[in-house]
Image (cartoon, rainbow, N blue to C red):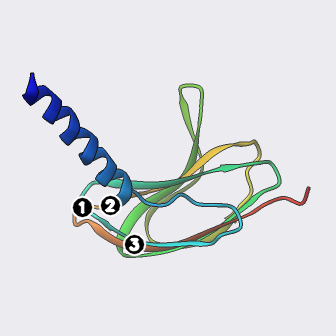
Amino acid sequence: MTIVKYRGLAFCVFMLVLAGCAESPIVPGQPKTANLDLAPYTTREDCVDLLQGDRLDYRFESNTRVKFSIYYRDSNMIVEPVTREDVAEDSGVFAPRIPARYCLLWEASPTGALIAYRANVLRAAP
């Protein structure tokens, strides 16, 4: 019975450490910059809730070609209004048509990827 208690405590400590290592989310009005080190064939995403009229200003550079998309979920579908195949860089200002949680997603090639990106959400005027 004592072992079970220690396992539960160890799991809680592990989750707190893991949460401390998590990327900070994109916050409207606060530009976010980050460097990603993706292992081969892995993905990384960064999400933000956007309202109609918001603008998501983004740019990234990679040391190798990657797949990039901006997507949101609609029920059980994934909708990708922005998709870039086999690119080493991209930038733009994305304007959502509907309010939703939008995610920037990078998918590494067989060699992995080092990605530097910047994202900033400009809120619509009230």
Query: What is the crowding at mark 3: few (fewer than 14 residues within 10 Å), some, or many (at least 20)?
Result: many
- Residue type at mark 2 is Ala
- Residue type at mark 1 is Ala
Marks 1 and 2 in Cβ contact (< 8 Å): yes
**Residue 110 located left or right of residue 6:** right
Location of the N terminus by quadrant is top left
- The residue under the point 37% across, 51% down is 19
101 up-or-down from 114: above or below = above
Query: What is the crowding at mark 2: few (fewer than 14 residues within 10 Å), some, or many (at least 20)?
Result: many
**Residue 27 located left or right of residue 10:** right
Q: Return the residue at label 2.
A: 108
Q: What's the distance in space between the residues labelled 1 and 3, CA to CA? A: 11 Å
Sequence-first disc among 2 and 3: 2
**Residue 98 located left or right of residue 72:** right
Percent of width and height locating residue 5: 16, 29
- Who is closer to the viewer here, 104 or 110? 104
Residue farthest toward the front in the current orientation of the protein: 2
Q: Return the residue at label 1.
A: 39
Q: What's the distance in space between the residues labelled 1 and 2, CA to CA? A: 7 Å
